[in-house]
Amino acid sequence: MRPVFRTCLSLLAAFCLTAWPSPAMPAGFAIKNQSGLAQANAFAGATAGAESIGYMFFNPAGLTRHHGHLTEIGTAYLVPRVRFEDGSASTVLASPIAGASAQGDVADDALVPSVYVMASLGETWRAALGINAPFGQKTTYDPDWIGRYHARRSELSTVNINPTFAWRPGPSLSVGAGLQVQHIETELSNAIDFGTIGAAAGVPGAVPTAQDGEASVEGDDWAIGYNLGILWSPKPATRFGIAYRSRLEHSLRGRARFTRDQAGIADALAASTGRFVDSNSSAEATLPATLSVGAYHDIDAHWAIMGEIAWTSWSDFDELRISFDNPNEPDNVTELAFNDTIFAAVGVAWTPNDAWSVRGGFAFDQGATRDRFRTPRLPGGDRYWLSAGVSYTPAAWLQLGVSATRIFVEDSDIALTTDGPGNQFRGNISGTVEADIDTIAFAAALQF
């Protein structure tokens, strides 16, 4: 490996393994923004396009369309806006929950970097490494809002390390395979209504919603999966791709902490039940598999069209269950009952000359949540993407790209009741979530 290429790889890997911010409001909590060049087409044709090595995230087989020693650096800046409106809430004892019935923007802006490097191993083999963040979620609500017993802070972030090989056995066919080595970190918190729990247990002096404490859980884990891809080009102007990214099964270990109320209700409950004591905790999280199919066609020397369909097995993520080493603390369960989802996109590219390319695309991104189970931790509905971008190749060794996307999110309802799993002392809550997302992405592809 050339020294400059090795040095670039080391620096970029160090950069990408720093703290990764977590955007909000993706489909489920997947982050599709893994290529600034592909984003310009709303990821239409991402499985078949292979227009830079960053497309390896969507199909590793596309690496055989590139030669030499290459790297691609990208970053997407996400500006989500998530608002909760028209809320009402009450306890299992029918006491109204006081607090803010609306929340402004509960999602933070986020910067999502990615890096890819590739080396040619002869004429038919390619070796590559991708480092990115394919899943993430972050929402933060005010301490006094009416849904505080369901959610205060919810954060999930991932780093995915993806060594990959691709092989071209013939002029029209390429195959690729990679290993996913993924680290996940989570932090969840919510208020605890010790007043209502104490009143239900007959603790003297307990007043519903007036004696709050807080629970917080954090954990992390490593998991291993794989990805596969095929690229077939029956004609020079046409290619089709199919790719699969496996599920990743995480077993998170961490720590649960409880903050007591000042009135001493939590202390009385802990003394009588052994609950609400700090302890180690664990949770299982299965991140979904994705199967995608894409097509790309050059109409002529200046125009190209592309399309994409992807299926994601979000139904694997049916609940969030936190278990505690403290035997007196029952599992904390949040029922999610996600649906499998479909992503579909179409795009077009205009290349007036060898230096410039203008792209656009539209996509439908189905939401994973259901009305009956939607939680403030993971709000959101179906999304519609509108993307445009431009790429510029000032020299044979450099390609630059910038793209912008507006994601329109359908309003969605939250309607959780105390008879749902784990909701007895979280209370009833209803309201409407309004959201939209703006994204700008940059990419630079270099050949050494």
Image (tube, rainbow, N blue to C red):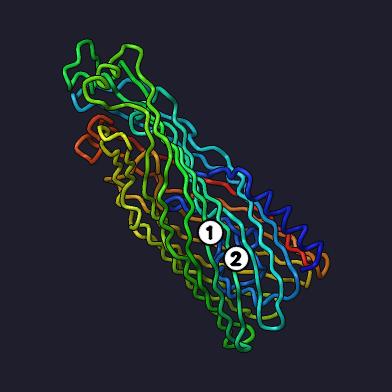
Q: Which mark, by number, is residue 181?
A: 1
* Three-letter amino acid code of the residue under disc 2: Pro
For this rendering, which residue is in front, 83 or 333?
333
Relative side of 224 to 85, left or right: right
The reply to whether residue 436 is in sight is no
Q: Quadrant of the C terminus?
A: bottom right
Residue drawn at x 56%, y 74% is 48
Residue 128, quarter of picture:
bottom right
Residue drawn at x 78%, y 58% is 7
Relative side of 448 to 296, left or right: right
**Pointers 2 and 1 in contact (C-beta within 8 Å):** yes
Which residue lies most toward the right here?
A: 395
* Three-letter amino acid code of the residue under disc 1: Val
Q: Is 421 above or below relative to 54?
A: above
Where is mark 2, residue-wise? 163
The reply to whether residue 124 is in sight is yes
Residue drawn at x 30%, y 42% is 334
